């Protein structure tokens, strides 16, 4: 089964980290990604730029509107994702718990809906 692991965290936590702490977190994250590739769980992983760089698009009654930033005002924002393949939800949870940013934020594990 495929699962999307959404990585949510408060950007202020990262902003407060030293260069050394950020470098260690980056190294740990890249090493974990390599481990997931080697174990056959990894499909794709990407980090996202700050929510400040985002736009939100809506279409209502045929009219498009574009606003700066994310729609929801929360402290935690989606910072990246990892698409994985595991045997079941328990295995996906185990994989998500190993994501280094789980120690600073939250990992939402959501099954992929297969059409057809």
Image (cartoon, grey):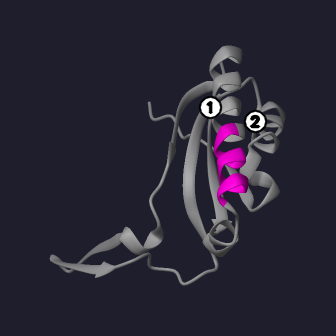
Residue at figure coordinates x 44%, y 75% from the top left: 70
Residue 20 location (% of width, % of height): 70, 53
Say whether marks 1 and 2 touch (CB < 8 Å): yes
Q: In the rendered view of the protein, which quadrant contains the N terminus? A: top right
- The residue depicted at 65 percent of the width and 65 percent of the height is 14
Residue 67 location in percent, x, y?
Answer: 30, 81
Instruction: Pick whichever, 3 or 19, lies toward us.
Output: 19
Q: Is residue 16 left or right of residue 80?
A: right
Marks 1 and 2, Cα distance to the nearest angstrom? 8 Å
Numbered badge on residue 92: 2
The magenta span reads: 19-27
Pick the residue in front: 87 or 102.
102
106 in relation to 54, above or below: above
81 left or right, relative to 62: right
Q: Crowding near pointer 1: few (<14 within 10 Å), some, many (20+)? A: many
Residue at (55% x, 52% y) in the render: 80
Q: Position of residue 116 (x, y in %)?
A: 44, 30
Q: Residue at x 77, y 36 (%)?
A: 89
Residue 84: numbered disc:
1
Report which quarter residue 55 is drawn in: bottom left
Q: Is residue 12 left or right of residue 62?
A: right
Q: Nearer the viewer, residue 114 or 32?
A: 32
Q: Nearer the viewer, residue 95 or 18?
A: 18
60 up-or-down from 4: above or below: below
How many marks are shown on the rendered structure?
2
Q: Which mark is residue 96?
A: none
Q: Is residue 47 magenta?
A: no
């Amino acid at each position: 089964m495929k699962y999307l692991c959404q990585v949510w965290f408060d950007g202020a936590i990262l902003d407060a980290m030293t260069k050394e702490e950020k470098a260690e977190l980056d190294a740990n994250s890249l090493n974990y990604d390599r481990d997931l590739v080697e174990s056959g769980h990894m499909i794709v992983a990407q980090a996202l730029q700050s929510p400040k760089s985002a736009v939100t698009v809506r279409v209502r009654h045929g009219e498009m509107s574009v606003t700066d930033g994310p729609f929801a005002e929360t402290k935690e924002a989606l910072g990246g994702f990892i698409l994985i393949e595991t045997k079941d939800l328990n295995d996906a949870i185990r994989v998500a718990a190993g994501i280094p940013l789980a120690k600073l934020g939250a990992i939402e594990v959501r099954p992929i809906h297969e059409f057809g």
